[in-house]
């Protein structure tokens, strides 16, 4: 009897493992579409803030679609650029950190910094 219960639980876990996995085999991932800029959508974000996030993610997507693959992470890293600037780090330090955060080239990092300044950093 105990062995049967273990088998039933194991079968249930295996069946559930495939549900909602968000794998690359999902229709959204296989459709060939770039990441949809919805960083923070539905999380109580003000519409103006959401619009700024979406614009930032869209700019990243225009630079390279891989940069916008995970919108929440991209926005978080973009905000880190703003923090670097607010903390008075040199342009070279901000550039270096952006390159490391986004695994980007110098040119991409410069464009990412410009996008962050435009859309995420407070004036």
Image (cartoon, grey):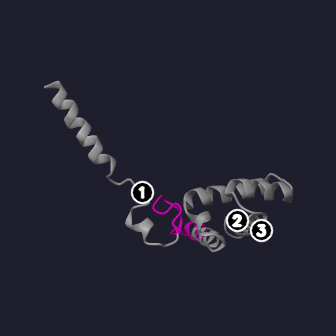
Single out the mark in the foreground, 3 or 2: 3
Q: Position of residue 33 (x, y in %)?
A: 48, 73
- The numbered dot on residue 23 is 1
CA distance separating discs 2 and 1: 29 Å
Query: Sequence order check: which comes first, mark 3 or mark 2?
Result: 3
Q: Secondary structure at mark 1?
A: loop
Query: Sequence order check: which comes first, mark 3 or mark 1?
Result: 1
Q: Position of residue 17 (x, y in %)?
A: 33, 47
Q: Nearer the viewer, residue 21 or 74?
A: 21
At 23% across and 41% down in the image, what residue appears?
11
At 54% across and 65% down in the image, what residue appears?
46
CA distance separating discs 3 and 1: 31 Å
Q: Nearer the viewer, residue 43 or 109?
A: 109
- The numbered dot on residue 107 is 3
CA distance separating discs 3 and 2: 14 Å
Question: Of helix, strand and loop, which mostly describes the magenta segment?
Answer: loop
Q: Position of residue 38 (x, y in %)?
A: 51, 66
Q: Residue furthest left?
A: 1
- The residue under label 2 is 116
Q: Quadrant of residue 115?
A: bottom right
Q: Is residue 28 magenta?
A: no
At 69% across and 57% down in the image, what residue appears?
103
Q: What is the span of residues highlighted in magenta in the rendered image?
A: 35-53
């Amino acid at each position: 009897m105990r062995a049967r219960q273990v088998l039933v639980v194991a079968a249930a876990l295996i069946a559930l493992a495939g549900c909602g996995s968000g794998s690359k085999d999902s229709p959204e991932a296989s459709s060939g579409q770039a990441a949809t800029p919805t960083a923070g959508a539905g999380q109580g974000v003000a519409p103006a803030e959401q619009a700024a996030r979406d614009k930032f993610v869209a700019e990243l997507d225009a630079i390279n679609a891989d940069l916008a693959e995970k919108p929440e992470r991209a926005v978080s890293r973009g905000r880190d650029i703003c923090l670097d600037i607010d903390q008075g780090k040199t342009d070279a330090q901000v550039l270096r950190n952006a390159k490391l955060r986004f695994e980007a080239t110098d040119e991409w990092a410069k464009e990412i910094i410009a996008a962050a300044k435009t859309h995420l950093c407070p004036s």
